[in-house]
Image (cartoon, rainbow, N blue to C red):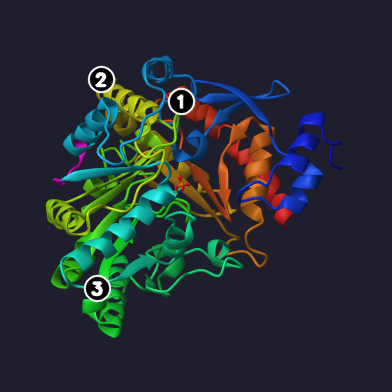
Amino acid sequence: MTQPLTNMQMRDVEALLHPYTDAVALRQTGPLVIDRGKGVRVWDDQGREYIEGMAGLWCCGLGFSDEELIEAAREQLGRLPYYHIFGGRSHEPAVELAEKIKELLPVPMARVFYQSSGSEANESQIKLQWYYNNAIGRPGKKKIISRIRAYHGVTIVSGSLTGLPANHQDFDLPVDRIRHTSSPHYWKDAKDGESEAEFVARLKADLEALIEREGPDTIAAMIAEPVMGAGGVIPPPKGYFEAIQPVLDAHDIALISDEVITGFGRTGNWFGAETLGMRPRAFSMAKQLTGGYAPLSAVAFDGDMAEAIEANSGRIGTFGHGFTYGGHPMGCAVGIKALEIYQRRDILSNVRRIAPKLHALLDRAAQHPLVGEARHCGLMGGLELAPPGRKGFRVGGKVGPRLSAELLKHGVILRPIGDTLAVCPPMIIGEDDLEALFAPMEAALDATMHWAR
Ligand code: PLP
């Protein structure tokens, strides 16, 4: 029996189209309307309390009520609520944040370019690769390699980079010039009896074969998340990036690290590229850049690219790309404050201290017969739901949402990605709240298993 919709829920379904939502089912259930937040908790409009195990959408690393971030936004709005950096204009927050980002990146980067979202960051990355290769007289080097199960956004090109069927189906994606190589998910994609090392060797061989087939001179870049996030929280198999980096280097194919989730401490280092042994020529950043309090994203790219792009703008007379809200002063002010807080409060140490606890809780949950695998890296993790002895349910994709709904009844918000349950709490979470997040897991798994029978 579904409850009758509240007035607010009725207004919602008449007014909104929700992302990543079955609009027909939503008419029956209505949305969960969140009203306020404090620390690692949020409350709905009926006053019910939830512990937020996803930091919103992987972004609220400092929780939902950080006074310093709020004050930074307020102060900037009072001083200069909007200005742009088009056509030779600038403002200090944009400059200061770019300097700070450059200081923190693990590989020297020359320039920062701003947008508002992760999708726009990756859209910019690909346009920059195309522009760069035109600028240096390599107009044929344009294809981009991504991976099956990757998530890089939803705009036309970033959505094409994404390697998930739901983002392509009925949107007429992917567009041309994008190629997907094998997914690095050992548990799901390895052949029976294949060791992790053999799996990595096969992924490397697949990449080499793809490059050979397409022609190395036609491929500009490969984009990769250090740890796949929205594809199911998939850390790569051991030695993966170490194996593929030389292949890319040999063919002058730039590696772009999509750090939209992994950036700013999530994996225990400032960037996932450090944790996973990548040597990128460009980075995409968003989400925890502002702790989720303002929409801001950034790309950073190396000196070779900067020099060629700037010289080409001189030849053409402009660099013809940019977004009205790219480098928004309030977003940049919040970003500066967020980075300062990560440093001053030593948030990375909290991630390193608390991550083993999260891993242990996930591993313990993996003892349940409904769980096939627990995965984790830093303060992000996933539980892969599967019936005993099988890699997937007969009717896939419904069991994760069911588990998430069971947990919600216990006041816990975790996100289903098909039949994976993702966990990505605010980086400020303490041990007690982490325990509280997992306290109803066993009961929720039992109820879900009962339902799935
Ligand atoms: N890249 C990665 C790795 C992401 O996880 C996401 C969003 O979750 C994006 C890009 C797209 O970001 P946005 O939703 O801000 O467009």
Give how far apart the Cα atoms at labels 2 and 1 are: 16 Å
Sequence-earlier tag: 3 or 1: 1
Find numbered disc 2 in the image and state the secondary structure of the residue it sits on. Answer: helix
Q: Residue furthest bottom?
A: 213
In the image, taking residue 386 as reference, residue 15 lies left or right, namely right
In the image, taking residue 117 as reference, residue 320 lies left or right, namely left
Magenta segment boundaries in residue numbering: 104-109
Counting from the top left corner in percent of width and height, residue 232 is at: 48, 54
Give how far apart the Cα atoms at labels 3 and 1 are: 43 Å
Question: Picture quarter containing residue 414?
Answer: top right
Q: Which residue is mark 2?
A: 344
Give how far apart the Cα atoms at labels 3 and 2 are: 43 Å
Tell which tag, 3 or 1, sits nearer the viewer. 3
- How many C-alpha atoms fall within 10 Å of the one at disc 2: few (<14), some, or many (≥20)? few
| Residue depicted at 21% across the width and 67% down the height | 133
Counting from the top left corner in percent of width and height, residue 17 is at: 68, 47
Counting from the top left corner in percent of width and height, residue 246 is at: 16, 67
Establish if 388 lies above or below 10.
Answer: below
Find numbered disc 3 in the image and state the secondary structure of the residue it sits on. Answer: loop
Q: Which residue is mark 1?
A: 63
Residue 343's tag is none
- How many C-alpha atoms fall within 10 Å of the one at disc 3: few (<14), some, or many (≥20)? many
> At label 1, which amino acid type do we have?
Gly
| Residue depicted at 27% across the width and 49% down the height | 283
Nearer to the camera, 352 or 92: 92
Q: Are marks 3 and 2 in contact (CB under 8 Å)?
A: no
Find numbered disc 1 in the image and state the secondary structure of the residue it sits on. Answer: loop
Dominant secondary-structure state across the stretch colored magenta: loop
- Residue 243 visible? The answer is no
Residue 141's tag is 3
Question: Picture quarter containing residue 428?
Answer: top left
